[in-house]
Image (tube, rainbow, N blue to C red):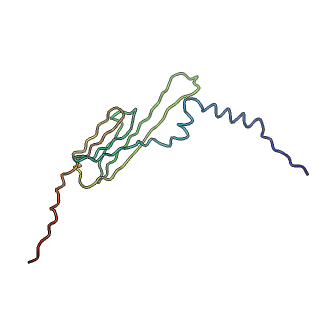
């Protein structure tokens, strides 16, 4: 009995090559396969007076955001439909996207909830959360027993 060597068909590599070429330009494949949803990265700074949250969200407008406080939880969300539609029916590729995110953060008890502010500039949403003044506890003192 002889061992039969299997040889890959010419049809399969050509078909897979066509599919790869279809999605190869403009990093479309990379974006399509790796992007699950738009979840912005957040930097949180703790200064003496404030907590400062910076959300990296380029390409949006300030009206796209919803920032609210519910039961000591800060919720930041956005919903946006982007479309690049042309009236030409003879297109080879038409792109549009729907992006949505929501991030929630428990706030510590030492914040002024009624003084929270948000500002959007240069692709960064900045939320400033002022802290309450915390009184320093009285230092411990050894008391002599008489």
Image x and y of residue 68, in percent: 30, 46
Image x and y of residue 131, in percent: 22, 49
Answer left or right for 124 relative to 97: left
Residue drawn at (38%, 38%), measured in percent from left and top?
56
Residue drawn at (64%, 31%), measured in percent from left and top?
21
Question: Of all residues shown, which one is farthest toward the left?
Answer: 146
Check the image and report above or below for 57 versus 91: below
Q: Nearer the viewer, residue 10 or 1?
A: 1
Answer left or right for 20 relative to 14: left
Image x and y of residue 73, in percent: 31, 52
Check the image and report above or below for 87 versus 81: above
Q: Nearer the viewer, residue 141 or 5?
A: 141
Question: Of all residues shown, which one is farthest toward the right?
Answer: 1
Q: Quadrant of the C terminus?
A: bottom left
Answer left or right for 38 relative to 53: right
Labels in figure, total: 0
Residue drawn at (40%, 32%), measured in percent from left and top?
59
Answer left or right for 143 relative to 119: left
Residue 13 image-quadrant placement: top right
Image x and y of residue 106, in percent: 32, 53
Question: Of all residues shown, which one is farthest toward the bottom?
Answer: 146
Check the image and report above or below for 102 versus 108: above
Residue 43 image-quadrant placement: top left
Residue drawn at (76%, 35%), measured in percent from left and top?
11
């Amino acid at each position: 009995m002889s061992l039969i060597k299997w040889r890959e068909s010419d049809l399969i590599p050509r078909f897979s090559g066509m599919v790869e070429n279809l999605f190869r330009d403009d990093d479309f494949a990379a974006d399509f396969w790796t992007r699950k949803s738009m979840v912005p990265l957040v930097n949180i700074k703790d200064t003496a007076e404030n907590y400062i949250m910076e959300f990296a969200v380029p390409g949006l407008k300030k009206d796209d955001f919803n920032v609210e406080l519910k039961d000591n939880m800060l919720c930041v969300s956005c919903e946006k439909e982007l479309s690049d539609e042309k009236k030409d029916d003879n297109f080879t590729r038409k792109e549009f996207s729907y992006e949505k995110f929501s991030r929630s953060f428990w706030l510590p008890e030492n914040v002024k909830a009624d003084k929270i502010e948000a500002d959007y500039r240069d692709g960064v949403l900045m939320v400033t959360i002022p802290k309450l003044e915390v009184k320093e506890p009285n230092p411990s003192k050894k008391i002599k027993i008489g």
